[in-house]
Image (cartoon, rainbow, N blue to C red):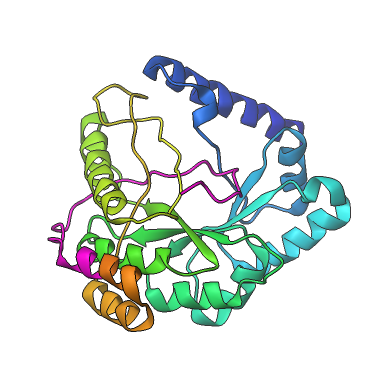
Amino acid sequence: MAMIAGQLALVRERMDAACRAAGRSPGGVGLLAVSKTFEAQAVLAAAQAGQRAFGENYIQEALDKMAAVRALAPQLAGELAWHCIGPVQSNKTRLVAGHFDWAHTVDRLKTAQRLSDQRPQDMAPLQVCIQVNVDGGANKSGAPPHEALALAPAVALLPRLVLRGVMAIPEPAPDFAAQRALHQRVRSVFRRHRRLRRGGAGAVRHPIAGHDGRPGGGDCRRQHAGARGQRHLRRARLRRRGTVAQVIAAAAARPILPRLPSTATGDRTDDRRPAPA
């Protein structure tokens, strides 16, 4: 397990170097350790080395691992944040809502509504990202970018969720310039979303690689919205009254962005607290 601590240290050194090259504070970038397929002892070793945010794809594997970590180190287990980074099927929403701190792959209003309805009242609101299929891959999950601006405001209204941004996994880009171009396009979607928001979507983490052409030089943020778009807004309008309905109607009236390739960006992964409006 000493190898895990050593690898973590190397990753952090690389992150710090990228931040320094961009003139940024290393504290502005979070690290999410993908722990799927690893045993609870490996998670515990990483946690003892200072890692606090862990990503899991498979719900039952994750639940078993959470229980094992609690049994091994109850106090330390309480400091960890668990991120669901795999698909959220309808029959798994209750488990995600009841055990995770984050869900990164929301791409339908129905899924978001179930997560909100099933989030226990004694837990903090679930932090969510909307997954966007940025490059139109036929085998990829996520809402197309042109749906994003309609889905996001509807998700942001759900009472037991905090919309933190978008998650995108594009195909590998051949060089930094191509990566930056993808990044800029996701960033533009995020900015459109922030203009449509009326409180409550929260602050988000900046990626290291950025929009200004320098490796590490960026101020991009996660964001997303959805094409099931106008349908979702019409349904939300029927449920809401007064100014909320007016906000949604205004969002629906905005022109929707064309489909754009983009890249994943996002919030600090170790922060479970809702960001200020």
> With respect to residue 132, does 15 lie above or below?
above
Indicate the position of residue 244 as horizontal and vertical percent values.
Answer: 34, 69
> With respect to residue 143, does 202 lie above or below?
above
Q: What span is in magenta?
A: 249-277
Q: Main secondary structure of the magenta part?
A: loop
The residue shown at (43%, 54%) is: 201
The residue shown at (28%, 65%) is: 247
Indicate the position of residue 167 as horizontal and vertical percent values.
Answer: 39, 53
The residue shown at (26%, 50%) is: 195
Let me know if residue 115 is in the magenta part: no
The residue shown at (32%, 84%) is: 238
Indicate the position of residue 157 as horizontal and vertical percent values.
Answer: 42, 67
Asked if residue 162 lies left or right of residue 48, the reply is: left
Let me know if residue 267 is in the magenta part: yes
Asked if residue 177 lies left or right of residue 47, the reply is: left
Q: Which quadrant holds residue 138?
A: bottom left
Quarter occupied by the N terminus: top right
Nearest the viewer among 155 and 7 is 155
Asked if residue 91 lies left or right of residue 110, the reply is: right
